[in-house]
Image (tube, rainbow, N blue to C red):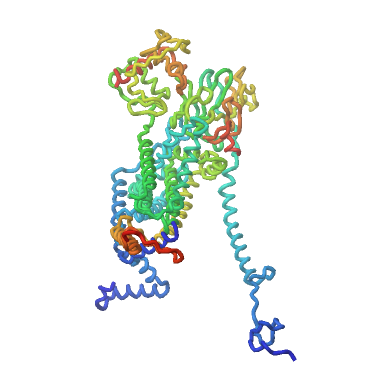
Amino acid sequence: MAESQGNDAPQGSSGGQYAGPRAIDPVQEHSHDHDPDFITRTKFLSGVAVAGGAVLTAAILVPIAGFAGADAVKTPKAQWVDIGPVSNFPDGQTTSIAVSGQSEWSDARVFVRNKDGQILAIWNRCAHLGCPVEYFKGGDNFVCPCHGGAYNSLGLVVAGPPPRPLDRFNIKVVNSGGATVGSVGKVHGSWSTAGLNPSARLLLGSPFSIDSNQSATRLHDPGEPVTGVLSNLYPF
Amino acid sequence: MKRAEQEAYERDYAQAKKEGKPFFPYAIYKDHIVAILVFAAIIGMAIWQRVGVGPPVYTATSTFEPRPEWYFFFLFQMLKIFKNQNALLPVIMATFIVPNLLMGLLIATPFIDQRAERRISKRPFALSVAVLVFVGIGWLTYQGETGAVPVSGGAITFTGITPGSAAAAGQTIFANSGCTSCHMIKGSGGQVGPNLTNVGTLGKTSTYAGTIPVKVPGVKGPVYSGENWFVLHTECPTCATPGSAMPAFANFTAKEYQQLATFLNGLGTTYK
Amino acid sequence: MSTTDIGPKGPVGQVGEAVVEYVDRRAGAKTGITWFLKRNIPSETSWFQTLGFAAMATFGLQAVTGMILAMYYKPDPTTAYSSIQHITNEVTWGWLVRGMHKWGASAMIILVFLHMARVFLFGSYKYPRELTWVTGAILLIMVMFMGLTGYLLVWDQRAYWATVVAMNITASAPIIGPYIADILRAGSNFNPDTLSRFYSIHMLVIPGGIATFIGLHLFLVSKLGITEPPWAKRAMRARRAEEAAARAAARERAPQGRREVTVAPATQPVKVEAGQ
């Protein structure tokens, strides 16, 4: 016979020997909310809802990002455009022409400089912020109207805020059959005029940027220096 | 703001509302009147100053000078301040650093200023910041507006210049050589170099003992003054003004140098 | 409406009332609208506090004139310029709608700057309205971008070159600048896709953002209430009363004039001041 001292209280657990469930206790529903290993229906469906939301968002955003972004950051392919016979660009002069039909750089203004035995094609896009640069015969220089950036005959900076020289275009000279004639000039992107047939065609290719020593580098956007500490801000 | 100040404000504001008036009509009637005035101004301007279109897009231009809409003039002018003069003032100061700094400070204002005081007379720092920002933006906008567009083509008329004279030829050379991109004369031109409207009155003289690139008859050193000074400066700016940022214009003919010098030397004296 | 309830209404009034009842039983409109319209605001609000509403009304004007312009505008480089000329010269009142949109843009910028100045000078950005200020600052930036993107759509020399330079400025931002500029321009240089991209941003992307943030901004303004100008007479009265009460309380604590009476602890003999 067990001693029945504290057995009167229905929820008795004080001082008694037996602390487990008794027949007299109401059935309690265990809440498994805080039990990490037990997956309740609520927990499962919450997970489905959140994961479903993530999938829906991705289904909208991923195609959009690809659509709006991918083409935009691809480097465009440029074709060689015929800009006329070599005789159009007389020796000792810088000739200004408008070039169209060259992929994204359609209707660009190019200054073809034929001097010192080589032909160069200089873009009129100012290296500071992209304003159109004008060529002045009197000074044999290029001046940008936006902030007074001035470049010399070769497109190298002599005054003002541009961080690097004017960009140039790749050029080559072909004969009427399409075969390349002549040879590359002393700097990248130039073509030697020695022994060139005046009726050979000059072709304009893709643009590239140069530093103050006329060494070529990949095309940069305006405002980006190509040498110095700040050029590290534009690694791509 | 400390909790006590916040609660004091809540109590004060609750009292203000208790003694206040309903939103409709006492606030909304004022809103409507002012909005009507604003609309009247917009419609009035639309009728009085008709909006047109400029010339169509020509991407291969080399003579067009880009300018932004007026409300971006203050940013545009900053580009004329941070001109890449040295490594500490790169172009990205004006294009990236300063604008983003201002935007960041703008958004963070309520977290920077957490004092409870609202009367502007007791917030000297806030008042000076507001005055500085608004006067600064206003002045830069005004500067951007009056930063005149260079006129390339000799459309400026001067009294005292007879057509066909050397000075007239000099003015044409000036207009066609890009000089107005950096120099202003009679209100037209850039502001990179000095204003030349009255340069003839300055009596400029320089001493330069070297040889100049292009020989012009009658122009010889070592002392250059009057028209000769202008010939020297055009051919070799750093010879006449050491440290000048002006590029050398060494490709004119001797006659062109003389005509240009005649024009420049008379600016402000004979030609106005 | 209490003073107008003086008798049975005519048929128009009865139908109107029935409609209101119908909607109210289903949507609770009366409660919401009554709260919004009849909530109290401080009685001494300044006329400068109308600038926010004026800015919003101007945004509404821009939205409506923009919608109409969009019915005639053709966002393709070959036809954009001629469609603008068509609107300006041939469409009935096209010049007026275009003029309202163009001048409305300048008005919008001026109004949001003035509104911001007013809020700053009144100190209305302080507790509890910090988030209202943040949403407003974001709205200001979005309005400037609307000006930038809308300007290009005319596709004349001014618009084109101003936007070329603006895109190059974006590209000059370190590391990610070139990519952001490429995405905005749809390429490394201006091309036909640039115009339609700017059109979509100007018409749909940013207005969606502005509408969202105006909604947040208005919700916060309505919930937190319109501020009282700091120099309002009621506020000064309350402040003076509070200061007077503080002074009275201080006097009460020190009844013998300026000297405070301190009672030393009981363990020490009490020092009697001479002449007290």
Q: Is residue B31 above or below residue B202?
A: below
Q: Is residue A1 above or below residue B239?
A: below
Q: Position of residue A215 (x, y in %)?
A: 61, 27
Q: Position of residue C154 (x, y in %)?
A: 42, 43
Q: Position of residue B195 (x, y in %)?
A: 36, 25
- Nearer to the camera, C202 or C46: C46
At 37% from the left edge and 68% from the top edge, which residue is drawn?
A: C35
- Nearer to the camera, B251 or C269: C269
Q: Quadrant of the N terminus of chain B?
A: bottom left
Q: Quadrant of the C terminus of chain B?
A: top left
The answer to which quarter of the image holds residue C210 is bottom left
Q: A27 left or right of C205?
A: right
At 37% from the left edge and 13% from the top edge, which residue is drawn?
A: B225
Q: C88 left or right of C197?
A: left
Q: Is residue A190 above or below residue A30?
A: above
At 31% from the left edge and 57% from the top edge, which residue is drawn?
A: B31
- Nearer to the camera, C241 or A23: C241
Furthest residue in direction right, as rendered: A1
Q: A68 left or right of A138?
A: right
